Image (tube, rainbow, N blue to C red):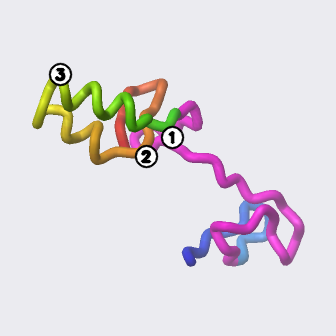
């Protein structure tokens, strides 16, 4: 279980918590792009991965190994 800092009071809170148990501040658990910080992300489906492998073979490794894709910058993570 990882800990993050509460944006309201600064105390350490579980990353799985919906709100800080200390001050009640809601905890944002949405997926953010590590490259640009955008919350505009999508899940890469298994079908999409299979089509990429069929078309590109080994060159689709980055997409196959990733779970999410940023809609803003295209980064796969």
Q: Is residue 21 left or right of residue 60?
A: right
Residue drawn at (19%, 40%) of the image:
61
Q: Is residue 30 left or right of residue 46?
A: right
Q: Nearer the viewer, residue 73 or 49?
A: 49
Quadrant (top left/top right/bottom left/bottom right) for the C terminus: top left
Residue drawn at (60%, 75%) of the image:
3
Say which mark, if any, is on residue 37. 1
Q: Nearer the viewer, residue 59 or 11?
A: 59
Label 3 residue SS: helix
* Magenta stretch: helix, strand or loop mostly: loop
Q: State how many labels appear.
A: 3
Mark sitting earlier along the chain (2/3): 2
- CB-based contact (under 8 Å), mark 2 and mark 3: no
Query: In the current view of this chain or complex, which residue is farthest to the right?
Result: 24
The image quadrant that residue 63 belongs to is top left
Mark sitting earlier along the chain (3/1): 1
Q: Does the magenta stretch include residue 30?
A: yes
- CB-based contact (under 8 Å), mark 1 and mark 2: yes
Write down the residue under mark 2: 34
Quadrant (top left/top right/bottom left/bottom right) for the N terminus: bottom right
Q: In this view, does 73 lie to the left or right of 54?
A: right
Give residue 58's position: percent from left, percent from top: 11, 36
Residue drawn at (15%, 25%) of the image:
56
Write down the residue under mark 3: 55
- From mark 1 to mark 2, how far is it between C-alphas? 6 Å
Q: Nearer the viewer, mark 2 or mark 3?
A: 3
Q: Nearer the viewer, residue 52 or 39?
A: 52
Label 1 residue SS: loop
Q: What stretch is highlighted in magenta?
A: 12-41
């Amino acid at each position: 279980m990882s800990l993050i800092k509460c944006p309201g009071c600064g105390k350490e809170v579980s990353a799985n918590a919906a709100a800080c148990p200390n001050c009640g501040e809601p905890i944002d658990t949405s997926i953010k792009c590590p490259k640009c910080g955008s919350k505009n992300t999508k899940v890469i489906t298994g079908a999409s991965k299979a089509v990429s492998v069929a078309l590109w073979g080994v060159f689709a490794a980055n997409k196959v190994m990733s779970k999410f894709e940023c809609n803003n910058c295209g980064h796969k993570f």
